[in-house]
């Protein structure tokens, strides 16, 4: 006798499903096929977790009650002045009663299928000091002399952004103190961990002999935890990259050096995002945990002066969304399998399958963009803060 939880997604492009089997003769729960639920960012509230609870019975069995629960919980915990501050909340709890409780048992035939469906709250997080998790529990209550059948299955919810929205990208142009104008363009609004962010930067001086000598780019991560009315914030630099020189283009070669409007500084940088095995989390916003990311630019500028050039910094902050390493097109486009084959792109088995299905060249490209130690995160959510105010910037100068 065994019980199977089978869940699959609705209104989502990937057709994979989750299956776990519990044997009545053993306390061991054996995963057979695992796949996360992938929900589009703007349709996450309308996505439906839908599936079946299947009883695999060797013979007709007396069942008094058959139910399944979908539970979501969030918790945070940290030490504060030698005391532990912790909080746990239940986000959602829903119960399906497939067989109403009764004093009399009913005979259930083999492979009894009980359909279920539920609207998903697409919030799932696994951070350093807290997490949000969802799971399904199924219970078949038998007669008093027989043990009950129980099974629990974690449900992973991933978010992706539809291509037609993500491809709108991030782009803006500003002027700064009548000294220069700058443009920053990024092709997409969100990027998965382990990938590269192509950043196009352009600066046009409005002052003679103003030069751009380099740029530093940081991926800044800010995590805020809430517990019992208290908040703590953890900030870190998740990625860093620099250029010691800036490409210089002259519109008219014959013009004098330093003429205003003749020189444009332009450069393309591919910022390497950290891989999921490193201490970094993707962007999310949940009741007790929020993780936000910003790209911080620091342009090194040389300003003209009578005696010697003055060095200055132009600092710009741009919000960006970081996704799970699983949110890549090749990964979510791969078909499902009936065995244990739904892996993070960082997993060696995923890389092997990618080469078989996509070809040696595409598989090798996937390998180059993935982690190599086999560890991977299982959770992913996405924040939507593109309505935030325009990027802030500041100018600081220092004599050298």
Image (cartoon, grey):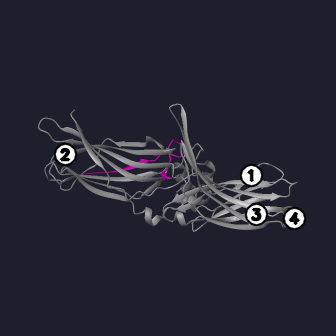
| Mark 2 Cα-neighbour bin, 10 Å: few <14, some 14–19, many ≥20 | many
Mark 1: which secondary structure? strand
Task: Please say whether residue 56 is visible from this viewpoint.
Answer: no
3D distance between C-alphas at marks 1 and 3: 15 Å
Give me the disc on residue 54.
Answer: 3
In front of the other: 121 or 196 = 121
Q: Residue at x 78, y 59 (%)?
A: 140
Judge depth for marks 4 and 1 and give the one in front: 4
Is mark 1 in CB contact (under 8 Å) with mark 2? no
Q: Quadrant of residue 46?
A: bottom right
In this picture, which residue range is highlighted in magenta?
Answer: 264-286
For residue 270: magenta? yes
Q: Residue at x 39, y 52 (%)?
A: 319
Question: Residue 33: image x %, image y %?
Answer: 69, 57
Judge depth for marks 1 and 3 and give the one in front: 3
**Residue position marked by numbered label 2 in the rendering:** 210
**Residue position marked by numbered label 4 in the rendering:** 60
Q: Quadrant of the N terminus?
A: bottom right
Give me the disc on residue 30.
Answer: 1
Q: Residue at x 81, y 64 (%)?
A: 102
3D distance between C-alphas at marks 1 and 2: 66 Å
Q: Quick check: 231 left or right of 7? A: left
Q: Earlier in the sequence, mark 1 or mark 3?
A: 1
In front of the other: 329 or 19 = 19
Q: Residue at x 56, y 47 (%)?
A: 131
Q: Earlier in the sequence, mark 4 or mark 3?
A: 3
Is mark 2 in CB contact (under 8 Å) with mark 4? no
3D distance between C-alphas at marks 2 and 4: 86 Å
């Amino acid at each position: 006798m065994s019980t199977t939880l089978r869940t699959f997604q609705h209104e989502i492009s990937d057709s994979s499903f989750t299956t776990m089997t519990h044997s009545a003769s053993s306390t061991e729960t054996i995963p057979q096929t695992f796949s996360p639920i992938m929900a589009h960012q703007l349709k996450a509230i309308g996505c439906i977790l839908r599936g079946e609870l299947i009883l695999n019975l060797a013979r007709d069995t007396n069942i008094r009650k058959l139910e399944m629960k979908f539970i979501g919980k969030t918790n945070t915990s940290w030490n504060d002045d030698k005391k532990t501050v912790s909080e746990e909340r239940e986000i959602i709890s829903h119960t399906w009663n497939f067989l109403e409780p009764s004093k009399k048992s009913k005979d259930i035939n083999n492979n009894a299928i009980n359909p279920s469906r539920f609207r998903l709250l697409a919030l799932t997080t696994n951070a350093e000091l807290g997490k949000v998790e969802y799971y399904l529990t199924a219970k078949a209550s038998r007669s008093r002399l027989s043990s009950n059948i129980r099974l629990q299955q974690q449900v992973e919810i991933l978010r992706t952004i539809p291509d037609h929205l993500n491809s709108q990208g991030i782009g803006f142009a500003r002027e700064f103190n009548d000294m220069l104008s700058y443009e920053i363009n990024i092709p997409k609004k969100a990027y998965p961990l382990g990938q590269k962010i192509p950043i196009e930067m352009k600066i046009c001086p409005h002052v003679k002999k103003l030069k751009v000598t380099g740029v530093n780019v940081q991926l800044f991560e800010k995590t805020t935890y809430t517990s019992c009315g208290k908040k703590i914030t953890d900030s870190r630099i998740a990625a860093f990259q620099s250029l010691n020189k800036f490409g210089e283009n002259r519109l008219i070669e014959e013009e004098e050096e330093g003429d205003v409007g003749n020189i444009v500084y332009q450069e393309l940088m591919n910022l390497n995002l950290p891989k999921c095995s490193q201490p970094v989390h993707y962007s999310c916003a949940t009741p007790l945990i929020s993780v936000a990311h910003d790209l911080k630019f620091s342009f090194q500028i040389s300003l003209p002066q009578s005696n010697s050039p003055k060095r200055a910094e132009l600092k710009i902050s741009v919000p960006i969304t970081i996704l799970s390493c699983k949110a890549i097109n090749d990964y979510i486009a791969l078909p499902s399998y009936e065995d244990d084959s739904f892996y993070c792109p960082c997993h060696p088995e995923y890389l092997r399958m990618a080469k078989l299905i996509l070809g040696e060249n595409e598989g090798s490209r996937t390998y180059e963009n993935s982690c190599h130690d086999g560890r991977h995160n299982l959770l992913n959510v996405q924040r939507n803060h593109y309505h935030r105010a325009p990027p802030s910037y500041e100018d600081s100068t220092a004599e050298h």
